[in-house]
């Protein structure tokens, strides 16, 4: 008994990568074990906790609920892709550091990707909207207080960067 | 002078890698296709005999490397076929039982490990599990405290009445005290099971290095030294052949202090046999059914008190459901029975508990470790006394407080570490005053009236606790100043999100006078610090913090001694600022710590410009040995901290809740915390710990339970069905105030803070719901349907 393998190309964080995977291989496992992008974490494997959230064509998707073979011809962004090209932290990452929005860090990548996508859609969220943005992700450490603060702070940082004098063209093109 | 970092809200250094996706959790170790993956066949029955295991189909699966049952273990190592260790023996645990790494003849809970497969990847390993055919003889399951006590069926044939231990402590003649008390009340209380549920489950990776004849193990644990010792014993290796490295750990909350898990032995054994890296990563369902639970207790309380509500006699009996086995001894019920007293001093106290068997997952400490149950018992009792006497609930508590001038206060009991339960310091009346202000206790009646006018029902509640933190036996630390001036610090206990790399670096920077950025902290790596105990009982800051402070002090003393010789000045005239030793008042006369590190290590060989200065023709008095008799080379400090007893942190919480008249949904409108953990190292981190604890407490109070059916199947073994709170279930804002009553027991005056947040939450929420609804709340958690049922009972 031998499994049929599929040679696939995945575009992750702007780089095209190749892997040979069985059809049943989850995107989360392919990212982690085939491509070595271990920043995406697996917390429940049934789509509830949100730790494995990545952006597929800009939208948050639970990588544990998607097959790797279904992700071809998409643009995937993982937590590794949220860091700026010069290696410094992106606005959401920076806000989580400033607000102590993480403790063990395991659920954090899913929050970072989710918040990144939500702030693109709604760059100036109200407090209630900021809470809603993270309402689909589980965290067992922080009690969410500082995560909500971090969402609001991230919006602030991103908005400040949007002003023409501080615009970062390389971020916009991503 | 450099600003002191102790007490500052320093941002966490570890976040830089976590936020970039560069954390290194156990499943990230050797994350490449050459690593083999393990999977475990788990019992589908709560109680059954294994008649036969047929594995003939398994090895046909392409990519399967190995399959084991209990029969195979003895040939790997005789000890591996024996039951797993009973970690904490106690004289009262007369009927302790532990499971085997793989079940032999009988299983006692759904999820117990039966067979172990190693394959090319986890998918194939799970395919192989499907092909193992087990013939079972199903036995009657004992589920729940009631069934266990009834003992119609036994969990273990040779354990009469399902009782593992019966234990009693008292401080006098409680019967006489109750008889002379002017008033007397009884309570029956019930607390459900919950679990730690870290976002990362358990996991172990092992690699056998045939070239050096050594085993290297990465495991998601709260005690790397414990796992190391267990592996050495069980695999028949010398301790020196085993290295255990704790990678980043995705949350622990207690469950990962339990060890060795079967996989922590089987994975290294397989790696050794196969000569390949082997990995086991627990999935979510496995975490529910094969890791540990906690909390389940039934309590009976008999209390006698005077007209002021002062407790004359307190007689507590409780039954503690410890599940199918007792690997962690009696720690949880001992903590319940002793910490139940909280900040109070009843004249006479007696507690009896029975730790009993059920055919369910084992019970080992979960954040708070028995304290939430003890707090629930005591605080529900206080509320009932207040209601009976028609007194304000804060007054009854205040009447029972140990007073600030009564410390140290000996409660007359033996605590979880086998030592006297003696509180070192605290100021409970001051905490209560702060709490009343923070929650608006005096203003609440007006608020209640105002909301009642709008048809809204609200209630207020409070609860107090004392937490013994920083229990022994010891922790140690090693501080090494490298010739670059960078400072490398190692302590043996582990980290699961508490920010140790930051707070310990703060302590070192302060003591040594170096830049915070130059300090790097490693925890839980037995190669760097082989003597350690572990991270539990809110002990890391107290134990390792103190040890690190002491070790840094030793390194500093040595640096000053060397500098004093080199600069020919008195040590007392030197100071260290930003990594430079200089003469006070004449800062141009200076040596940086890196240079002192060079001088501390006499060399034969130079390898760079700096090391030339330490070679044999450059330094030293030819009339003396290069390293003095009572000295050693290198600029290092090592020390251990081992206190006589624990230090006692304390706190008080209060909440205002609203109950929906139609849906019986409970909403927390305001939540207030007053917390006293002595001096704070990093207030930002302490507050984060409190937030997280409160959230877990709310989960336990309102949502989380382990829903076992009568046959012992866990019906809610997923995040779909086990209701862990999202942000939507947690109050928007938690008000925190600190009191800092330093501990006299350690050099920093600190007390533990990790578990505190969770301890009183169920008691607080129960009190507030009771206040809103006007009938007693005696069982937690309380769901809307539970509350609805209670309403019906109390209106009919």
Image: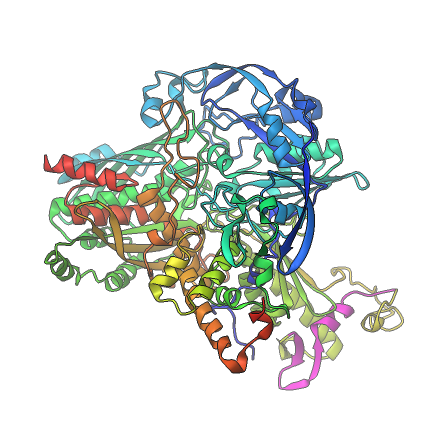
- In reply to whether residue B590 is colored magenta, the answer given is yes
- In the rendered view, would you say B730 is above or below B570? above
Residue A66 x %, y %: 54, 45
- In the rendered view, would you say B149 is above or below B484? above
- Identified at 75% across, 73% down, the residue is B595
- Identified at 42% across, 57% down, the residue is A134
- In reply to whether residue B158 is colored magenta, the answer given is no
- Identified at 61% across, 65% down, the residue is B553
Quarter location, residue B477: bottom right
Quarter location, residue A142: bottom left
Looking at the image, which residue sits at the far front?
Answer: A73
- Identified at 63% across, 31% down, the residue is B125
Residue A119 x %, y %: 45, 65
The answer to whether B126 appears left or right of B364 in the picture is right
Nearest the viewer among B89 and A118 is A118
Q: Is residue B99 visible?
A: yes
Residue B334 x %, y %: 40, 37
Report the magenta residues as a range.
B579-604
Q: Quadrant of the C terminus of chain A?
A: bottom right
Residue A40 x %, y %: 57, 52
Nearest the viewer among A24 and B212 is A24
Nearest the viewer among A85 and B617 is A85
- In the rendered view, would you say B45 is above or below B537? above
């Amino acid at each position: 008994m031998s499994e049929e393998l599929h040679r696939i190309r995945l575009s992750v964080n702007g780089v095209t990568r190749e892997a040979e995977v069985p059809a049943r291989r989850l995107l989360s496992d392919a990212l982690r074990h085939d491509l070595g992008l271990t920043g995406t974490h697996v917390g429940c494997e049934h789509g509830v906790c949100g730790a494995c959230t990545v952006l597929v064509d800009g939208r948050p998707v639970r990588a544990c609920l998607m097959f790797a073979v279904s992700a071809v011809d998409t643009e995937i962004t993982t937590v590794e892709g949220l860091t700026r090209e010069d290696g410094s932290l992106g606005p959401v990452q920076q806000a989580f550091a400033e607000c102590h929005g993480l403790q063990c860090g395991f659920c954090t990548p899913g929050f970072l990707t989710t918040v990144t996508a939500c702030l693109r859609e709604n760059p100036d969220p109200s407090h209630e909207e900021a809470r809603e943005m993270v309402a689909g992700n589980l965290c067992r450490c922080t009690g969410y207080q500082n995560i909500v603060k971090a969402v609001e702070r991230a919006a602030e940082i991103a908005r400040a960067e949007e002003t023409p004098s501080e615009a970062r063209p390389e971020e916009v093109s991503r | 002078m450099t600003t002191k970092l102790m007490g500052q809200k320093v941002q966490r250094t570890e976040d830089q890698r976590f936020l970039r996706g560069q954390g290194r959790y156990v499943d990230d170790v050797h994350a490449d296709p050459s690593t083999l993956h393990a999977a475990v066949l788990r019992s589908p029955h709560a109680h059954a005999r294994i008649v036969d295991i047929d594995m003939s189909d398994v090895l046909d699966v392409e990519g399967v490397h190995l399959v084991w049952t209990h029969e195979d273990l003895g040939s790997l190592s005789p000890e591996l076929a024996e039951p797993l260790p009973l970690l904490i023996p106690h004289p009262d645990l007369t009927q302790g039982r532990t499971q085997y790494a793989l079940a032999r003849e009988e299983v006692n809970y759904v999820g117990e490990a039966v067979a172990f497969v190693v394959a090319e990847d986890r998918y194939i390993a799970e395919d192989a599990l499907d092909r193992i055919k087990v013939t079972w003889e199903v036995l009657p399951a004992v589920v729940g405290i009631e069934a266990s006590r009834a003992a119609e069926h036994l969990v273990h044939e040779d354990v009469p009445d399902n009782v593992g231990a019966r234990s009693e402590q008292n401080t006098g003649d409680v019967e006489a005290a109750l008889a002379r008390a002017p008033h007397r009340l009884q309570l029956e209380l019930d607390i459900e099971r919950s679990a730690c549920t870290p976002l990362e489950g358990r996991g172990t990776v092992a690699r056998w290095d045939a070239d050096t004849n050594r085993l290297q193990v990465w495991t998601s644990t709260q005690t790397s030294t414990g796992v190391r010792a267990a592996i050495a014993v069980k695999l028949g290796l010398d301790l020196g052949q085993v290295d255990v490295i704790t990678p980043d750990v995705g949350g622990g909350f207690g469950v990962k202090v339990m060890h060795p898990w079967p996989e922590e032995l089987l994975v290294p054994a397989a790696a050794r046999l196969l000569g390949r890296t082997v990995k086991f990563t627990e999935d979510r369902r496995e975490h529910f059914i094969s890791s540990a639970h906690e909390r389940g207790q039934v309590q009976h309380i008999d209390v006698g008190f005077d007209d002021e509500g002062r407790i004359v006699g307190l007689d507590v009996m409780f039954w503690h459901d410890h599940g199918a086995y007792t690997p962690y001894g009696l720690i949880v019920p001992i903590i319940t029975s002793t910490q139940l007293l909280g900040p109070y001093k009843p004249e006479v106290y007696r507690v009896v508990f029975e730790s009993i068997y059920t055919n369910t997952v084992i019970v080992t400490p979960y954040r708070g470790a028995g304290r939430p149950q003890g707090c629930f018992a005591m605080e529900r009792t206080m509320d009932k006394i207040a209601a009976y006497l028609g007194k304000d609930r804060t007054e009854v508590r205040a009447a029972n407080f140990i007073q600030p001038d009564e410390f140290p206060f000996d409660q007359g009991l033996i605590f979880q570490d086998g030592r006297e339960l003696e509180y070192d310091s605290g100021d409970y009346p001051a905490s209560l005053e702060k709490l009343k202000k923070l929650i608006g206790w005096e203003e609440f009646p007006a608020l209640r009236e105002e909301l009642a006018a709008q048809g809204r029902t609200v209630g207020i509640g409070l609860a107090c606790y004392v937490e013994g933190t920083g229990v022994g036996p010891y922790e140690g630390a090693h501080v090494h100043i490298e010739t670059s001036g960078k400072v490398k610090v190692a302590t043996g206990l582990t980290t699961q999100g508490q920010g140790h790399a930051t707070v310990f670096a703060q302590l070192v920077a302060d003591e040594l006078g170096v830049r915070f950025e130059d300090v790097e902290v490693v925890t839980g790596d037995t190669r760097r610090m082989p003597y350690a105990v572990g991270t539990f009982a809110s002990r890391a800051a107290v134990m390792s913090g103190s040890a690190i402070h002491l070790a840094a002090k030793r390194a500093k003393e040595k640096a000053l001694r060397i500098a004093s010789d080199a600069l020919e000045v008195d040590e007392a005239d030197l100071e260290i600022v930003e990594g430079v030793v200089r003469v006070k008042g004449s800062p141009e006369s200076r040596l940086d710590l890196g240079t002192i590190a060079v001088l501390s290590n006499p060399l034969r060989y130079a390898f760079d410009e700096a090391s030339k200065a330490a070679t044999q023709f450059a330094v030293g008095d030819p009339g003396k040995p290069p390293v003095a008799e009572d000295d050693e080379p290198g600029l290092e400090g090592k020390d251990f901290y081992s206190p006589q007893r624990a230090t006692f942190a304390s706190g008080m919480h209060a909440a205002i809740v609203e109950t929906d008249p139609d849906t019986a949904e409970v909403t927390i409108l305001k939540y207030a915390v007053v917390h006293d953990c002595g001096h704070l190292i990093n207030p930002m981190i302490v507050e984060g710990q409190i937030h997280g604890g409160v959230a877990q407490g709310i989960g336990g109070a309102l949502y989380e339970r382990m829903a076992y059916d009568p046959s012992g199947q866990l019906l809610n073994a997923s995040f779909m069905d086990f209701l862990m709170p999202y942000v939507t279930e947690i109050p928007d804002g938690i008000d925190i105030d600190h009191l800092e009553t330093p501990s006299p027991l350690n050099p920093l005056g600190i007390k533990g803070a990790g578990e505190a947040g969770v301890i009183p939450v169920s008691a607080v929420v129960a009190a507030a719901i009771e206040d809103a609804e006007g009938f007693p709340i005696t069982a937690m958690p309380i769901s809307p349907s539970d509350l609805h049922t209670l309403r019906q009972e109390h209106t009919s």
